[in-house]
Amino acid sequence: MTHEHVAETSHDRPGLSRGLSNRHIQLIAIGGAIGTGLFMGSGRTISLAGPSVVFVYMIIGFFLFFVMRAMGELLLSNLHYKTFADFAADLVGPWAGFFVGWSYWFCWVVTAVAELVAITAYVQFWWAEVPLWLPTLAVVAVIFILNVASVKNFGEMEFWFALIKIVAIVSLIVVGVIMVATRFTSPDGHVAQVSNLWNDGGWFPNGAMGVVAGFQIAVFAFVGLELVGTTAAEARNPRKTLPRAINSVPVRILIFYVGALLAILMVTSWSSVDPGQSPFVSMFSLVGLASAASVVNFVVLTSAMSSANAGVFSTSRMMFGLSAEGSAPRFFRRLSKAGVPARALGFTALVLLLTIPVLYAGDSIIEAFTLITTVAAQLFMFVWSMILVSYICYRRKHPQRHAASEYKMPGGLFMCAAVLAFFAFVVWTLTTEPETAAGLVSLPIWLGGLGIAWAFVRRTATHKQAFQWFKAEMEKPVDHAELER
């Protein structure tokens, strides 16, 4: 017998290790809400929407909070659910688990590859002579080694990565408040004052289409907000830690997104923000911090590593879940002695090494990655939408579970419809720019490919047997006392 074990029947199914404490869950939730889109992409968003970008982030955050609440009620309605794919397969049907699982896997693989390319660029900012392949190989190796040892290592990495992001944003806000309070005057004559929010063309200087353009980019910054849901299977006492993490989403968005953007917009006029530069660099440069570029480079480097780390964690858990329900090879159903899906982790690490040939692909790499990450963002919206569809099916199939739930989604079915309508609006905004419109064409291709694959998978005896076993697992009673230890 090796140090790995696999579930052959419902009686010996291995369980993912519940090694994430409340401290880990809270910081993972914060880290998931803060991405490189805020640090690097906010300059372009401000240049398009002006001060109204504040409302754009608040609106997106408002609707995604309800997605999180729906996810929370679903995960806590049956603690056998380990991933989004689990409750989608159980509540909507096996096809939904297949589509959600593989789409989410692809989302994070693409995102992690993009972040690894970004990490290479950040490393070369300091050491231009470093070979392109070395940062990718080093980061993938470190993330794999730490993750394969125990889930607690993943939690520790995310804890410290998130802490760096928090310190950077809080520092920005504090510096901004001090500059406004002292009416700091920049070298070009701009005075830091609250009225900068409306002095240069008002709140909506570029009109309605400026606001629409802001949605195109801002929605990408929220990718990963749902990451706390993938930690449910490995959280100690999820009935307490998950609601606490999800309920803090509005506060996190107000502080880390709205607070940071307001600080930037009050210090200087929105029209003077360089869309090609991080506004964090500009802010720290104004106060005379000569090493501002290096400080922000360090922050975005750790942010990118955090995203790559989250990608490895998420894809390996999703692969494990897909294998459990027969939608991926049984090979990935094995867990290590530490309760970690080591084989799925290894497969993910190998896939991420495909970043290396991409790095040598030529001058069009930036355009290619703009297209790929646009596709990934749409797939995230697809996953978020399927969470809501699963919630609708849950309300129809298990009204007694909903009635007994201690963590009900506010607004229920009405808010599900409202959020789905909002996602339809966001998809429309993606059609208004050539770069993002091109990405929309790729989404039906991906889903069509999954449809063809599902047509074959659903007929296999292995999938039918595994799904029956999966359904039996979902109906087992949960040992709540064990989870609360």
Image (spheres, rainbow, N blue to C red):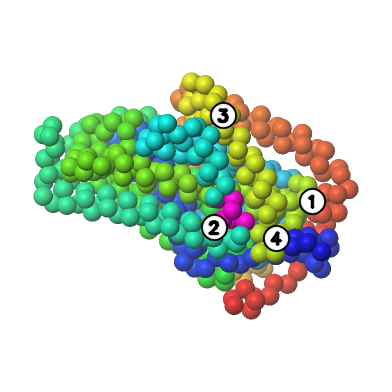
Mark 2 or mark 1, earlier in chain: 2
Mark 2, residues whose alpha carbon is within 10 Å: few (<14), some, or many (≥20)?
A: many
Q: Quadrant of the N terminus?
A: bottom right
**Res 330 label:** 1
Confirm whether residue 281 shows in the render: yes
Mark 1 or mark 3, earlier in chain: 1
Q: Name which residue type carries label 2.
A: Phe
Marks 1 and 3, how far apart at CA: 30 Å
Mark 2 or mark 3, earlier in chain: 2
- Which residue is disc 2 drawn over? 154
On screen, residue 220 above or below 83: above
Mark 1, residues whose alpha carbon is within 10 Å: few (<14), some, or many (≥20)?
A: many
Marks 2 and 4, how far apart at CA: 15 Å
On screen, residue 419 above or below 252: above
Q: Which residues are magenta?
A: 143-148
Q: x and y percent of residue 218 in the render?
A: 42, 39
Q: Nearer the viewer, mark 2 or mark 1?
A: 2
Look at 37% across and 45% down and name the residue there.
298
Marks 2 and 1, how far apart at CA: 24 Å
Q: Name which residue type carries label 1.
A: Arg
Q: Is residue 322 left or right of residue 227?
A: right
The secondary structure making up most of the magenta span is helix
Look at 64% across and 30% down and name the residue there.
444
Marks 2 and 3, how far apart at CA: 26 Å
Q: Name which residue type carries label 4.
A: Ser
Look at 39% across and 35% down and name the residue there.
127
Q: x and y percent of residue 311 in the render?
A: 56, 47
- Which residue is disc 3 drawn over? 358
Q: x and y percent of residue 166 in the render?
A: 36, 55
Mark 2 or mark 4, earlier in chain: 2
